[in-house]
Every structure is written in structure tokens, then in C-alpha cells.
Amino acid sequence: MKIRFLIPLAVFLVMTAFLAIGLKLDPREVPSPLIGKEAPKFSLTDVMDASKAMSTYDLKGDAVLVNVWASWCVSCRQEHPILLDLAKRGEVTIYGINYKDTREEAQKWLRSYGNPYHSSAFDPNGHTGIDWGVYGVPETFVLDKQGVIRHKHTGPLTQAVIEDELLPIIRKLRGEP
Amino acid sequence: MMAEFGHFTLILALMMALIQGTLPLIGASRNIKSWMLSGLYAGRAQFLFLSLSFGSLICCFIQNDFSVLYVAEHSNSDLPLYYRIAATWGAHEGSMLLWATILAFWTLMVSSIQGSLSLDFHARVMGIMGLISLGMGLFVLLTSNPFTRLVPVPLDGHDLNPLLQDFGMTIHPPMLYMGYVGLSVVFSFAIAALLGNHLDSAWARWSRPWTLIAWIFLTFGITLGSWWAYYELGWGGWWFWDPVENASFMPWLVSTALLHSLAATEKRGAFKAWTVLLAIFAFSLSLLGTFLVRSGVLTSVHAFASDPTRGSFILVLLGLVVGGSLTIYALRAPKIREISEYALVSRESLLLVNNVLLVSAAASILLGTLYPLILDALKLGKISVGAPYFTSVFAPLMAPVFLLAGVATLVGWREASLSKLLRQLRYLGPTSLILGIALTAVFWQVDDLKTLSGLTMGIWLVATSLLSLWNRIRLRKRFVEGLLAQSTSFLGMTTAHIGIAVFLIGVVISNGYSQESVVRLAIGDSTDLAGYTFTFRGIEDVVGPNYKAKEATFTVTRGSSEEAVLRTEKRIYKVQRNNMTEAAISPGLTRDLYVALGDPIDQQTWSVRVYYKPFVRLIWLGGLIMMAGGFLSVIDKRYRLSHLIRSVSKTQTLQSPPRHS
């Protein structure tokens, strides 16, 4: 038997092994070592206004959501209407981290699809994203009043995630000192 | 009662698949005629039972039988009848039953057309299709049974996902599945040929029409899906390189390669081992697509259904089908003798280039789709691969395809003269370039290299395809006589190549020159975009069968002439409480005007998105032209049954002597 005719089979077996491992993994669930720790510090500018500073200090004082997004991310578009809806209800303030994007594209995106964020920090080279342990956008963090990360959701938000996962945590955090 | 009947006939169909997957294969190896024939009857019976089963599921939907879990989850008594029927395949269980039913339909077709196929070959084909049916049947019955009852019975159903309540989406899955599953026929032919050492030009000739038909459905399904995404998702985009889209695109690329390589195998006996491998790949990628969509290993905007146990089952099925067939390939392929010889400049060489490019494109999409998963499995982190990767890899791979597709038809089989070819093209090349530059300069900016090169390639592809046709027509005295003398398969090929050019031109212009703007408009206000004036005329409440909506009316004027009246809706579906935007589109060959209602700012003011999309229709028109080309090819008289029988017996007599030497 000539070896070259075995190549397709070998490639396929390797692929199957990865698919089998992939089945056990949940692409949406990533444990974050940062949970329970203070949110990594950043000092950036507001994506809508380059002259306006934005830092971790702005996030303190109330339980808030921090949503990492980018204009090039398709899943961000999927969750976008849900974020807009949440912002309109006014139950929680949503901050954004605009990850590895250009200011122009990001502004265009927010103007086109609506802006649910109180403000978004502009992180063009992704350094802050790396500090925050961002694997892939979109990701959403829940921060308590002291600015400590208490929960993280990876992947697009759905109505169910907001109702059953994020809002209960936020309500609980509101009750804490 | 209906659900139990459906369940029962599903089990009967599985029994038939068991017979069909075993007896004919054993019969073929032991030469037992009655066993070989049994596969044909079992296959037809399987189709009968699966249609009854699928039919009873449709009945459950029509009768609003919410005691059936699947119906309760995906329908509602307010859902219009048309969508209740379409809801049958609107989610996982039903669409898998549809998959199995379509496979049985193809089985019926194959069982009815024996022609001159030898009995053992035909029996093996039926046997392999039976094994696939068995796997799918078990999958439906064990992990995704749509007939499961629900106790207690709910008063009403949970309704169909509003995204799917749309005409395009109701016919998209059946068309795509016809294509996916249609590739199982070529696959079975290839495996049967490997098992029985029948890899000859007769096998290639039998495989071609089946591949073409599957390819036509696949092309149609993908085109429909893209069109649906364009108008229903309301983002104005037509392709997102999403894993689910990629899953349908990979089989398309490989089956396109297969069509071309089959031509070389049929005409010249070339690339036999490669063609067999492509046939295996094409169907494997269809199965992989099903796995990716159904298992939830990848995140996708189309995350309709996912369940790890189903994923494991499909993975095992995938492993058995693909692993088994590649093992057979590894054992049998070394014995295949390639008899053809060809020079560097020949149609064979160019078809080889076509195959290498198309398969590389499919492989790079596969890599991009699976890359996040591979990194995750190796614990190297989670990433998402987006459109930038795909466009940067895909464009350079496809550019030579566009350049060579027309040229290849000018080059003869076996050996051709390069100088003669260059002489034929000496005017066409510069003319296409000048035309490309001129058009870009007149309508857009001349320094826009993307548009310029895209247009030039499109014009070049059309020109070279037509030159090849003209060369043939010229042999006759009169034009019409010459045109009529061409085989429909040649006309089909020319048409399909022109379709690619039309598609390319649509992509280039709409990507380069679409304009969009988001404005806040009060009733009576207007906004300008690309020379058109959009005026917000008013808004009113509308009530649909299962939704309430705000309907906004816009008029579009250009200069003093009215171009269109557009009505866009913001719907709230009663049961799932989903907000849906129904974009309003004024379609046109040269431009689409697209208005989508955003959010209300106050009683009178709304945010509104308006798009101007030049030549975007050409994208789908190109797909339809390709399909028409496929259709012309498949009705060629060479593939008609009577002709197949005669020519196959001829090739067999011609080929038998060298086989013994």
C-alpha cells in the first residue's frame, strides 16, 4: 500500500480528534481567573470623544456591566439589540470597551446601530483587553460597587442570559455595601 | 394518533434501511442475484415510509397538535398555515427528519434508474446509500425524535422563531438539503466503484449528472440563504463568513472542483484517484456541515439548535462514514491505473489548477472555521476568526480561478499550443483591461484598484468564455445554425462561467460603493443619500396574525421623479416577545434602496437606517445564472438515459481489452 493514499485518512483522524475534544468544550464558557479581583486598571479615552478620558475609576460606585465589543465582530451585532433594550430599561449602566478597533469604524457602528453604552473606552491595540483576559469578543463583565469583577459572560448575550444570569447578580450586588 | 403513526413508519423505514444497507452489499460480493435486487425494493419502501412519517409530522403541525413536544415548541395556533407547514423543518428534529426523507428521495431516484449499470454495481450503490440512511435514521430516532409526546398538553405553542417566518427561509433548508444529500449519490457511486474496481469513464459519466443536480440545488440553497440574510437580518450584508455559512460553502467549492475533475475523468480517463477522493470529500463536508450546525462546537449567529449528545452521535456517524470510506480509498486507490498522458499546456493541466485552487480555498475555509476549536482544544486560548482572515485568504486564491476559467475552455485536451492560445488572446487581454479602467474611471474612481481589477477580471471571464463559444459557432455558415449546433452542456458551461463573472462584478461594486447613513427623522423630514431623497411620510400601527407592528412609510425621490414608496416595519411577535425589523427594499438591477426602521426617539421621531447598494442584485443574479448553466448542462442529450445506455456499452467494449493487458 502506498503511503500517500493514507494521508487523507490520517488528516481526517486528527480532525476527528479535535472535533471530539471540541464537543466537551463549551465555546461560550471560559472561567476567568479575574473573578473576585479588582478590575485591571486602564486609562484610555472615550471612543466617541478622543479628548475625554475614561478609566477604571469611572466604573466604581455602582454595580455595572462592562461589555467588550468591536465593530468587526458579527456576534456583537447579534447581541446589540438586546443591549440597547437593556440600556433603555435603565436598570443598569452599561460601559463598553471597544477592543482592537479603529475610532472611525467604532463611531460609525455606534451611530448606525445605536449606542447602549454610557461610555466606551477606546482600546485600539487590545492591551486593556489582554489585561482583562478577553479571549474573543463579545464578552461581558459584571462589576460590583468597588469595581471588583464578580461575573463574566463569554459570547453574545441573549434575553435569557440577561434575565436569568446578569440581572439577578446585579440586584444582589446592589444590596451589598 | 398521527404522531404514533409517524413514529411507527419511521421505525419501519429504519428496518428497510437495515435491509438496504446489508443484503445488497453481501449479495454483490457473493453474487446472489435476489439479494442484490432486494436493495432496490427496500430503498423504495424506505422512501414510502419516510414520506408517510414526514407527512404525519406536517399533519401534526397543521392540526396544532400541541401534545407533540416538537409542535408545541415551534408552532402556535396564531401562526399562519403556510408557516405552520414550514415550521415542520424549522428546527432540529424536523429538519433532520427532512434530511432523512430527502436521502430516501434520492435513493428512490437511484433505484429507479438502472440503465446499463451492472447489477452488482447498482446493488453496491444502493447498499452504501442504505448504510447512510441507517445512520441518519438511528440518529433521528434515538436523539432527535420529533414525535415525542408532551404531558401535560399546553394550551398553545411557543411559536416559530420570527426570523424563520419568512418565505426565503421556508425554502432555503429543503434546497440546501437537496444539495447536501444529493452529494451522497456521487459518494455512493465512488465507494461502489472502489469496491467493485469499476473506476472507468462509464462511472464518471454516470456520476456527472448526479453531481450537477446536487450542485444546482446547493447553488440555489446558498444563493437563497445569502438573499435571506440580506433582507431579513436587516444588516445590509449578504455574507458573514459565519461557521454555518461556511459549512454550506465548503461542499459547494469541492463539488465544483468535482464537476471539473469528473469532466477530465470522463473524457480523458485522467485524475481517477483524485476524482474519487473529491467525491468522498464533497459528501464528507456536507456531513461535517451538519455536525458543525447541530453540535454547537462553534459559536455562530445561526445558533438554532445545539446539543452535545447529538453532536457525539453525528461525530461517530461522521467517523464511520468518512473514516470508513477513506480506509477503503487507502486500500483500493493504489490499484487505480491512470492511463492518460497530457502536456503542460492542455485542458487537463488547467483543470488540475482549477481543482488545486478550489480545494485550497475550501481547505482554508475549513481551517478558519475550525481554528478557534483547535486552539481551544490545545488550551491555547479562545479566539474568533472573522471576515478579515477569510477575505485576505480567499481573494488571492479565487483571482486565478476567474482569470483561467474562460481560458481553459479555449485550450484543447492532451496538448495545446501556447503560441496559438496567446495569439487568440492578444486583443482580448488589453481590451478587457482598457474597458475595466474606462468603466471604473467613468463611474467611480480610477485609482480604486479593487474595483478596477474586479471589473477587469469579470469582463475578461465573459470575453474568454464568449470567444470559446464563438470559435465553435464560426465553424458553421450561419450564426443561429452554429449556436444550435452546440451541445447544451457546452452552453451550460459558458453560462455558468458568465454567472461567476456577474457575481464577481456585483460583489466588487456593491462592496466598494455602498453607502449607508443613520439619521433621526421626524415625520415629514427627509434625508439625502447617494443622490436620492428619502422622506419620512408617517407611521401607523399594523396588526399581523401573530404580531403587532409599527409601519413607517417613506417616499424616495431622485430629482423630481418619484422612485419608490417603501414601507418598513418594526414588529413585536406576541409569543416570543421578539423585536424584528422588516427592512423595506426597492430592488433594481443597478441599485437597491434599503430602509430599516430603528428605535423611536420620541412620539414623532425615529432613528432610521438608509442604504444605497449599487449592483447588489448581481450577486444573486450571478448565482441564478450559474444554476441555469448547471441546468443546461444536465439536460444534455449525452446524459439522457437511452444515450447513457448506448455509450456505456460502447465504452465498456472499448475498454475491456486494455484491462487484461
Image (cartoon, grey):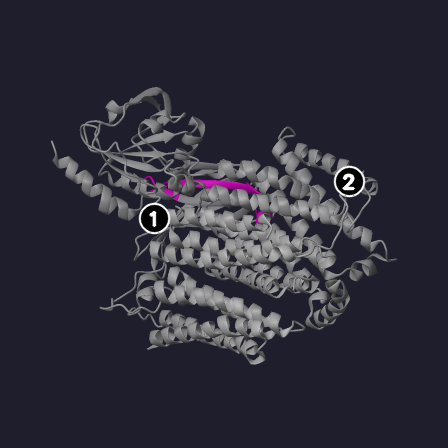
Residue annotated with mark 2: B428
Residue annotated with mark 1: A24
Q: Amino acid at mark 2?
A: Leu
Is residue B659 visible from the viewing direction of this image? yes
Q: Are marks 1 and 2 in contact (CB under 8 Å)?
A: no
**Whole-percent x, y for residue B374 in the image:** 42, 42
Residue B599 magenta-drawn? yes
Q: Amino acid at mark 1?
A: Lys
Q: Is residue A39 left or right of residue B18?
A: left
In the depicted structure, whether residue B28 falls above or below residue B388: below
Using the image as rendered, state which of residue B531 and residue B108 is in the foreground.
Answer: B108
**Whole-percent x, y for residue B426 in the image:** 81, 38
> Which element carries disc 1, helix, strand or loop?
helix
Instruction: Please count the marks in the image.
Output: 2
Using the image as rendered, state which of residue B61 and residue B490 is in the foreground.
Answer: B490
Compute the Cα span from label 1 to label 2. Answer: 56 Å
**Can marks 1 and 2 be said to lie on one chain?**
no
Query: Which residue is the extreme one toward the right?
Result: B477
**Whole-percent x, y for residue B560 in the image:** 57, 41
Quadrant where the N terminus of chain B sits is bottom left
Using the image as rendered, state which of residue B127 and residue B551 is in the foreground.
Answer: B127
Instruction: Write the start and end of the magenta stretch as one range.
Output: B598-621
Q: Dot 1: within a 10 Å radius of its alpha carbon, few (fewer than 14), some, or many (20 or more) residues?
A: few
Using the image as rendered, state which of residue B65 and residue B328 is in the foreground.
Answer: B328
**Whole-percent x, y for residue B655 in the image:** 75, 65
Chain letter behind tag 1: A
Chain letter behind tag 2: B
Quarter where residue B270 is shown: bottom right
Q: Is residue A68 left or right of residue B369?
A: left
Query: Which residue is the extreme one toward the top?
Result: A51
